[in-house]
Image (tube, rainbow, N blue to C red):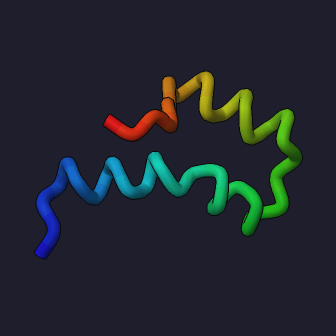
Amino acid sequence: MMKRGRAAKIRVKRWPEFAALARLSPEWRDKIAKAHRLTFTDK
């Protein structure tokens, strides 16, 4: 079983992919990411 923090990190990292599957426009994808303070750097 995956630890909670790691699962959340994977979801955040894959956000652009999930947004594309939901057919969100890039503009809305970016607005939602900004509102939730999602960053996509590998740390």
Q: In this view, does 36 lie above or below 40?
A: above
Q: Which of 9 and 4 is in front in this view?
A: 9
Q: Where is residue 3 in the image (x, y as percent from the top left)?
A: 12, 60
Quarter the N terminus occupies: bottom left
In the displayed structure, 30 sits above or below 16; it is above
Q: Nearer the viewer, residue 40 or 22?
A: 40
| Image quadrant in which the C terminus is located | top left
Along the viewing direction, whichever of 6 and 36 lies nearer the viewer: 6
Residue at screen point 33% across, 48% down: 9
The single residue placed furthest to the bottom in the displayed view is 1
- Residue 27 shown left or right of residue 18 in the figure: right
Percent across and percent down for residue 26 are: 84, 42
What is the number of callouts on the image?
0
* Residue sitting at x 32%, y 51%: 8
* Residue name at image x 72 percent, y 32 percent: 30
Question: Which residue is painted at 88% across and 46% down in the image?
Answer: 25
Image position, residue 31 (x, y; %): 72, 28
Left or right: where 29 falls relative to 5? right
Give coordinates of residue 27: x percent, y percent: 85, 34
Q: Answer with the quarter of the image where residue 11 lies.
A: bottom left
